[in-house]
Image (cartoon, rainbow, N blue to C red):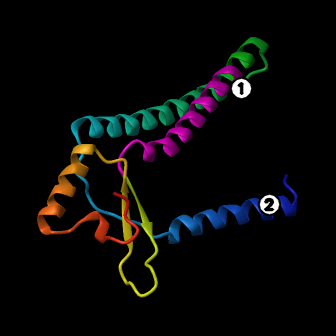
């Protein structure tokens, strides 16, 4: 049992993180992906799902096998339970790594006097960036025309 102070800190941090992620500005839309990028993202998703499923199954088997007074079966059940817990932690880590594999974006607050937010796209294929740059040059726009933009 945790003390009141520890409970308060843990739930306070959890509430702060939920509010921060829930209220943060987000960008949504669709970017064309190369086949390799789409395969990499799909593999990351299915690996995460598989790890979580195997982890839950191993933890269940470990609890069933280890629920005995027999020392050998109890020890085997404990090891199966530990392997399941490690698999679940790996799946949780994969959840945090997955967004770093594909393209992403960052939404910036509007500058004073402006109403539009600037969205910076990250981790894009160089051919996609070149095509966008060429299209903008045809329209007469230049990266140097956008305040705060990086060439």
Residue 16 falls left or right of residue 21: right
Assign the magenta stretch its main secondary structure.
helix
Position of 92 with respect to 80 (left or right) is left
Cα distance in 3D space between marks 1 and 2 = 31 Å
Q: Which mark is residue 107?
A: none
The structure residue drawn at horizontal position 21% and vertical position 57%, both measured from the top left corner, is 133
Q: Which residue is mark 1?
A: 67
Numbered circle sitting on residue 7 = 2
**Mark nearer the viewer, 1 or 2:** 2
What residue sits 35% from the left and 79% below the top?
Answer: 116
Near-viewer residue (65 or 15): 15
Locate residue 138: give its quadrant.
Answer: bottom left
Looking at the image, residue 92 lies above or below residue 84 = below
x and y percentages locating residue 45 in the rendered image: 39, 40
- As helix, strand or loop, the secondary structure at mark 1 comes to loop
Residue at the spot 62% in from the left edge and 24% down from the top edge: 83
Task: Establish if 21 lies above or below 131.
Answer: below
Residue 25 placed where, x, y %? 45, 70
Left or right of 40? Residue 2 is right
Name which residue lies at 16% across and 62% down.
137
Look at the numbered disc 2 and give the secondary structure of its residue.
helix
The magenta region covers 78-103
Question: Quick one: 28 or 105, which is closer to the camera?
Answer: 105
């Amino acid at each position: 049992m945790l003390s009141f102070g520890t409970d308060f800190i843990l739930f306070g941090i959890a509430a702060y993180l939920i509010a921060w992620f829930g209220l943060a500005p987000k960008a949504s839309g669709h970017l064309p992906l190369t086949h390799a990028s789409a395969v990499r993202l799909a593999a990351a998703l299915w690996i995460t799902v598989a790890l979580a499923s195997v982890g839950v199954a191993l933890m269940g088997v470990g609890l069933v096998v280890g629920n005995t007074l027999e020392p050998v079966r109890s020890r085997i059940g404990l090891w199966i339970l530990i392997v399941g817990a490690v698999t679940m932690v790996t799946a949780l880590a994969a959840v945090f790594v997955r967004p770093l594999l594909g393209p992403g974006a960052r939404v910036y607050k509007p500058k004073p006097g402006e109403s539009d937010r600037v969205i910076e796209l990250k981790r894009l294929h160089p051919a996609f960036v070149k095509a966008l740059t060429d299209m903008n040059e045809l329209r007469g726009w230049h990266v140097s025309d956008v305040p705060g933009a990086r060439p």
